[in-house]
Image (cartoon, coloured by chain):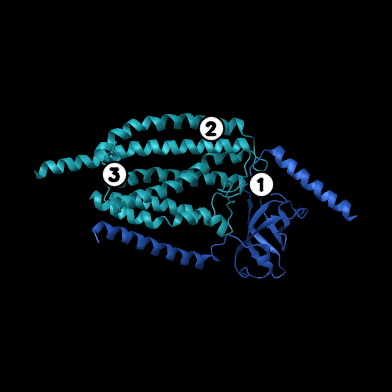
Chain colours: A cyan, B blue
Amino acid sequence: MNLYKYSSPVNFYPLAGRLIPWFAIPAALLFAAGIFVGFFVAPADYQQGEAYRIIFIHVPAAWLGMFLYVLMAVYAGIGWAFNARLSSMMASSISVTGAMFTFLSLVTGAFWGKPTWGTWWVWDARMTSTLILMFLYIGFISLQSSIEDPRRADRAGAVLAIVGVINIPIIYFSVQWWNTLHQGATIRLLQKPTIHGSMLYALLIMLAACWLYSVAVVLIRVRCIILEREQNAARFAEATI
Amino acid sequence: MKRRHKRIAFILVGLSGIAIAAYLVASAFRNNLVFFFSPTQVVAREAPINRTFRVGGLVQDGTLKRDPDGLTVRFVVTDTAANVPVVYKGILPDLFKEGRGCVAQGRIDAQGVFHAEQVLAKHDENYMPPEAGQAIDKAKYAREAAKTVVGN
């Protein structure tokens, strides 16, 4: 089988259609499982009581906001460097989901901050850099939609996306580099997570659900983008003959 | 060099340029991006004297006192090396407790007392059920009790 076949938008379109249910259905099941474990199995926290339960959506949303940005920049960069149309379309498709998750993490963070810290918002390094991430997403989306020619829009978007990647390590390490109101990382690569068992399971189930949801939605959206753009290309080809 | 190679080279050079620029900016901002100063920094007079800043640390055990008016609270913020006495008039967040983290915003007076306009609770990155939290507290008290016994 030739995998390169699927780098062509026209060939990828039916493949994406077949893949969507394989991500969408597990996502729905895992969301239900994660919410059940998060609300009914995981115990209350020793300090924060019930309020901590918002991490089950806040943390996956914040992680995906960051991961999807890197993924978007990689796709945009590949699309720019190798003139791969489908790759650029994937970047445009991811940007909306990434912006949605970043927005969700900011809003749920505010809801969490009020009962625990005593404030909706402060300008500490973690929160400010996450707000910048949100603006980068909005900038990418509005820059692309303000340029008529899709190929030029892809290139302009790629430059912005790649430049913005520098914000991701700043967000991630902000709680280590500077004094912040935001607490440090609970789950780290090489250390034991400082979160109790069933709380951790709920968090990981919700994270998996959010990933699967993202893949499904990105594929649905990229199919729309393929339809939009390739239709134009087909009409253009017809008109020039 | 083909156009594609040029483009890739351009992206790589651009990326490394951005990385260097970001590193320089981050290291320049390093000291200005702190959300709060530690009591050690405040005692060492590294914090600004004549303008508002934040001090963060643990609320020292046994120092939280309420004035008779019922609104004014006094407590000591510590990082175990240095202490800053804080006065605050207002409602404290629910998570504000002795032995837990807090961040206070305000000014320091000539006597070294910090007059807070806003007090925020800072919780840590540990999540566990209440029973586990109590067990840890108990173990801590037991250790301290053992220490006093040995000390006597």
x and y, in percent, of residue A168 in the image: 46, 54
The label nearer to you, 1 versus 2, is: 2
Vertical comparison of A207 with B85: above or below: above
Q: Are marks 3 and 1 on the same chain?
A: no
How packed mark 2 is, by other alpha carbons closer than 10 Å (few <14, some 14-19, many 20 or more), is some
The amino acid beneath tag 1 is: Leu
Q: Quadrant of residue A165?
A: bottom left
Q: Secondary structure at mark 3?
A: helix
Q: Is residue A110 left or right of residue B123?
A: left
Write down the residue under mark 2: A35
Give the label on residue B95, or none.
1
x and y, in percent, of residue B150 in the image: 88, 53
Vertical comparison of A6 with A129: above or below: above
Residue B108 in sight in this render: no
- How far is mark 3 from mark 2, CA to CA? 35 Å
- How far is mark 3 from mark 1, CA to CA? 50 Å
